[in-house]
Amino acid sequence: MDLEFTPAEEAFRAEVREYYTTQVPARLSEKIRLGQHLDKAEQEEWHAILNRKGWLVPHWPVEWGGTGWSVVERYIVDLESSLANAPRALPFGINMLAPVLLKYGSEAQKAYWLPRIKDGSDWWCQGYSEPGAGSDLAALKTRAVRDGDHYVVNGQKTWTTLGQHATMMFALVRTGQSERRQEGISFLLVDMASPGIEVRPIITLDGGHEVNEVFFSDVRVPVANLVGEENRGWTYAKYLLTYERTGMASVGASTAALGWLRSIAGKARRNGQPLLDDPLFAARVARAEIELANLSTTALRVVAAVAGGGAPGAESSMLKIKGTELRQEISALTRRALGPHAQPFMPEALEEGFNGEAVGPEGAAAVTPQYFNLRKLSIFGGSNEIQKNIISKMILQL
Amino acid sequence: MDFSHSDDRRMLADTLDRFIAGRSDPMARARLAETAPGYDPSLWEGFAELGAIGALFSEDHGGFGGSGFDLMVVFEALGRGLTAAPFLSTLMSGRALALAGRADEVEEIVAGTRLVAFAHDETDAGYDRASVATRAERSGDGWVLNGGKSVVRDAEGADLLISARTAGGEADPEGISLFLVPAGTSGVSLNAYPCVDGGRAAEIALKDVALPATALVGEGGALIAEAMAAGTLALCAEALGLMEVIRDATVEYLRTRVQFGEPIGRNQALQHRMATVLLEIEQARSAVINAAAALDRNGDDRERVLSAAKFTIGKTGTFVAEEAIQLHGGIGMTWELAMTHFAKRLVLINHQLGDEDYHLTRFIALGRAA
Ligand SMILES: Cc1cc2nc3c(=O)[nH]c(=O)nc-3n(C[C@H](O)[C@H](O)[C@H](O)COP(=O)(O)OP(=O)(O)OC[C@H]3O[C@@H](n4cnc5c(N)ncnc54)[C@H](O)[C@@H]3O)c2cc1C
């Protein structure tokens, strides 16, 4: 074992740090630092910047624009980009759909869709969940019926993240009548501008609008937009989910969040001393720090164990659980650190150009809403309970 | 020993539950928070007519209750309804004024015709009760106040009971006095905002606020302690009411939400989670009962028991809120669901009058002192 970076890795790290600390527009990194949301144009701007640099789709095969980075190099990029408060490219096209297309898509689909993901022509959203199909995804009912060169889709998706901006959705739909519910599901690419699609906002408990309901009535989707074979979509869907989960270790994001926690807590006082010197609070922060150091090695171990750099199997569930719990804990500690200043609800202070009077330390306005918003981490991407079921079955064989 | 409430208190609880269910919609709380004063004044009048305010004060002070168990009954009911009304401010300011012998003002408070916000916390204080930088200087017969107060609930349009230093250094527990400052006094400016859990609060700037001699209510120490003690118990009882509703809503969801062909509550993993929620809530109830009994006693023992309760509520409240959201899945993340607003209030109670760690530290310190 050797936990040191090689000289080549050190050099790479310096290059990555140099890039992220100098090339992220300050407007964007400042928003990320203060916990503000990027709007659609800013998200697109960042996507384009990364694409120009050639770092947008590192894990794609090199012939499609991937960087060929090793596990360690990817780890370095995750960490350095987070520490520089760089935004994240949205994962839906890059990290979720693309691996499915690369493995199961036709040559024509790859040639058409992958470049469009890269250049930002399409904004993708994920159409998996339905009101009756959350953890039990195979219970989905949205139906697609073949009619000549088209499928006709009827039904409803829900929790569709950023569906209000999306131009395309990859959706799971029911095409077969099989006894086994997992057979008879297909993976379709749906144009969000199609007649018959209606997107309605869902407001989350923090007051934000990031998820939606999407209704389909007689929506016509070309048969050419079927990925892989009809009725085999379940296999593709599950393949995608392990990719989704592995990213949820969020070591970089937790490292940055811990830094933010220290900066907020560094300004606070309790019982006449700096909060960070309060033994109870210091112990809480130390626990999080230790957990993060452990997780960072666990994440590297799990990913490194996969030959060829693909997605890990059931082990990705460990990363999902630990990564999301830690992110949530750090956000809870940041809320605690604010003391009485956790109470004000000033969503307008999170908007650009706010010039009202802020309350509490810089950035305080985002903290409590973000704490509530991040409760989602243990619910989506397969809830943490479902991950434990997977570990019980697949690893423990119970 | 007897662990049941008296008939009178049971009746009070029933009356309040019925009144709140009929007149106050839990979902209204967040909406009302958008504009001043953050609650429905006609509902507040209704509470006054019902005697709900009177239940918080003893007969000596124009009420008909005022014991720890009276407070417990009232605030638990308010929690069950996620009620938006200035009860906490009224209790804290009213109890301090009553102890100071300001009978006229207390009478109006009990009648619901005078609102007095309790303006003690300051920006750099954390939860430290002795950390008061606002200063009061003598000026002729009267006083001049300078400084500021932070996150003062229900301050808009209300009189303010302001703590200010008349002697001593910044974190000195001695040398703090209370001043009653009428709404709209010149030199007082408010920056008001909604709170995450509903209700409204304000940052208050005090610039050369000139006050007559009669504004001085008295030396702060005992008065602030009385307000804090009553307020702490009240928040604990409110949290208990919130937790009862959250528990019931979550159990109901586990029974009715079907995934994998059966109610999710059939999973033993979730049954045990919910069982833990239930037993932690019962432990918290005992803590609140201990605190209610202790309120009527004096001295460090009372303070220690109150800190034990607020510690328990801070820890358990956050746990219950997080579990309830998690067990609801995606629905638990939505504004539309009343439960999430109960959960937000429950978490934010941990940020009023001292959180879990603050009260654990205080519990240890009081134990050493004893
Ligand atoms: C903010 C947010 C964004 C999302 N974005 C998207 C998106 O873009 N696209 C998309 O398709 N979906 C999205 N989702 C949906 C997400 O994947 C689902 O919420 C998730 O799968 C859980 O499903 P559910 O909400 O129906 O909860 P349920 O499945 O009803 O679960 C409720 C509770 O029961 C537990 N549970 C269920 N079954 C079991 C079991 N067998 N054993 C033990 N416990 C169990 C769950 O863990 C949970 O605690 C998003 C969700 C959120 C909250």
Image: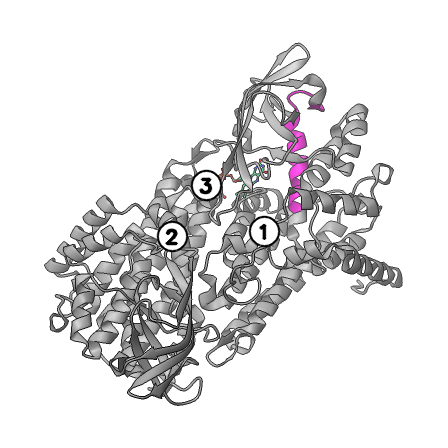
Residue A54 visible in rendering: no
**Is disc 2 in the same subunit as disc 3?**
yes
Amino acid at pointer 3? Ile
Place of residue A302 in the rendered image (x, y in percent of width and height, measured from the top left): 71, 51
Q: Residue at x 57, y 45 (%)?
A: A387
Residue A321 forms part of the magenta stretch: no
Most prominent secondary structure in the magenta stretch? helix
For mark 2, does the 10 Å Cα neighbourhood hold few (<14), some (14 to 19), or many (20 or more) residues? few
Amino acid at pointer 1? Ile
**Is disc 3 in the same subunit as disc 1?**
no
Residue range corresponding to the magenta coloring = A226-246
Q: Nearer the viewer, mark 1 or mark 2?
A: 2
Residue A302 visible in rendering: yes
Residue B331, disc: 3
Q: Residue at x 80, y 64 (%)?
A: A2
Q: Residue at x 52, y 50 (%)?
A: A373
Front one among A290 and A39: A39
Residue B35, disc: 2
Side of B195 relative to B118 (left or right):
right
Gap in angstroms between the C-alphas marked 1 and 2: 40 Å
Upstream in the sequence, badge 2 or badge 3?
2
Front one among B79 and A71: B79
User: Quick one: SS at disc 1?
Assistant: helix
The quarter of the picture where the C terminus of chain A appears is top right
Q: Is residue A128 above or below residue A14?
A: above
Residue A321, disc: 1
